[in-house]
Amino acid sequence: MSSLLPEITAATQAYYAQTADFPLTATDFYDWLASLSPVRRAEVLKRGFTTTQSEPDFLRWCLEVRGYSMRDFMAERLSIAAYATWVGQGAVATRLT
């Protein structure tokens, strides 16, 4: 499995890099907050919008609501073994509610 991690990491970084194509807004932040549990929401609010802009959960949410499916992106870029490993880690579950 460790030989697959660089492949998974590179694809994951490429997925999140797509956020450079559009601005991350305060509206995104507050819409995402509304989808979180109260405990998680309180944790995120303490850190604020500026800090949260680099959080993978927030980035993925922003990408997914704009139609950038992480599952599809990873399936297109990973080898069969790497994709199976990624799915096995539970990473395929969407962050949208």
Image (cartoon, rainbow, N blue to C red):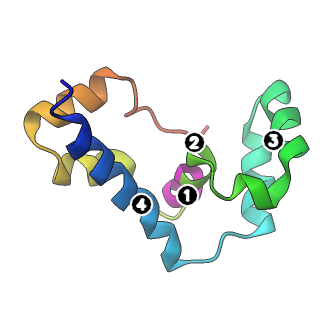
Q: What residue is shown with label 2?
A: 96
Q: What residue lies at 51% left-to-right and 75% top-to-bottom? A: 20
Q: Secondary structure at mark 4?
A: loop
* Residue holding disc 3: 44
Residue that appears at 9% across and 36% down: 80
Q: Nearer the viewer, mark 3 or mark 2?
A: 3
Specify the principal SS of the magenta part. helix
Which of the marked residues, 2 or 1, is nearer the chain's N terminus?
A: 1
Q: Quadrant of residue 1?
A: top left
- 59 to the left or right of 46: left
Q: Amino acid at mark 1?
A: Val
Asked if disc 2 and disc 1 are in contact, CB closer than 8 Å, the reply is yes
Distance from label 4 to label 1 (Cα)? 7 Å
Q: Looking at the image, is mark 2 or mark 4 earlier in the sequence?
A: 4
Relative to 43, does residue 33 appear above or below in the rendering? below
Label 4 CA crowd tier, 10 Å (few <14, some 14–19, many 20+): some
Classify 52 as above or below 17. Answer: above
Q: Where is residue 22? Give x, y as percent.
A: 56, 77
The extreme left residue here reads: 80
Mark 3 or mark 2: whose residue is earlier in sequence: 3
| Amino acid on which the number 3 mark rests in the picture | Val
Pick the quarter of the image with the C terminus. top right
Q: Residue at x 63, y 56 (%)?
A: 54
The span from disc 3 to disc 2 (Cα, nearest Å) is 16 Å
Question: What range of the chain is rendered magenta?
Answer: 60-64
Amino acid type at mark 2: Leu
Q: Which residue is mark 1?
A: 65
Label 4: which residue?
68
